Image (spheres, grey):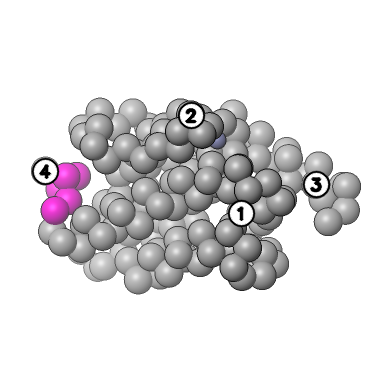
Amino acid sequence: MTLQLDELYQEIILDHYRNPRGAARLDHVPENRVHENPTCGDAVKLEVPLQADGTVGPVRFDGKGCAISTASASLMTAHISGKSVAEARADAERFITVMRGGEDADILDEWDDLACLKGVIRYPLRVKCATLAWHALLDALAEAAQGDDPNSE
Ligand code: ZN
């Protein structure tokens, strides 16, 4: 990775940190849905509405934490909204695998601004920051599939 690219990625992360997309107060989502990364102090909970046509509606997140966890949640909402449930689950699993070094990180070049998180892979402690919202997404999708959707009322 060139220095210039590194700087560009940093700017994207900071932009999403300062102006997170999909951020909202989700007081109706119970606290037991909060995902935490205690080593950094990150916390996030999600609202993942499923549409009648089987796609994921606009995903929103309520969280606090470092730039990487916030930027990753922000980028996740934009990436996942509108996808089918199966695609959303596959993408979340793939993102987590890539972040853990289990798959070539260049895949993220095809995921638009999510490529900015490639540099995080070099810092194992920060990987948990980057994957937090995606673990929360997998849980929310699993719960929704069981018909136990707290957002449906
Ligand atoms: Zn963090």
Taking the spot 61% from the left edge, 54% from the top edge, the residue there is: 114
Mark 3: few/some/many CA within 10 Å (<14, 14-19, 20+): some
Q: What is the C-alpha distance between the residues marked 4 and 3?
A: 44 Å
**Secondary element at image label 2:** loop
The nearer-to-camera label among 4 and 1 is 1
Q: Earlier in the sequence, mark 4 or mark 3?
A: 3
Mark 1: few/some/many CA within 10 Å (<14, 14-19, 20+): many
**Secondary element at image label 3:** helix
Q: What is the C-alpha distance between the residues marked 3 and 2?
A: 25 Å
The correct choice, above or below, for 30 with respect to 51 in the image is: above
Residue matched to label 3: 6
Residue matched to label 1: 114
Residue 152 or residue 99, whichever sits in front: 99
Q: What is the C-alpha distance between the residues marked 1 and 3?
A: 13 Å
Q: Earlier in the sequence, mark 3 or mark 2?
A: 3
Q: Quadrant of ligand 1?
A: top right
**Residue 5 point in image, percent of width and height:** 82, 50
**Residue 147 point in image, percent of width and height:** 13, 59
Q: Which residues are magenta?
A: 148-152
Q: Is mark 2 within 8 Å of ligand 1?
A: yes
Q: Can the viewer see residue 146? A: yes
Q: What is the C-alpha distance between the residues marked 4 and 1?
A: 32 Å
The label on residue 41 is 2
Q: Earlier in the sequence, mark 4 or mark 1?
A: 1
In the image, taking residue 100 as reference, residue 115 lies left or right, namely: right
In the image, taking residue 93 as reference, residue 72 lies left or right, namely: right
Main SS, magenta residues: loop
The correct choice, above or below, for 102 with respect to 133 in the image is: below
Q: Earlier in the sequence, mark 2 or mark 4?
A: 2
The label on residue 153 is 4
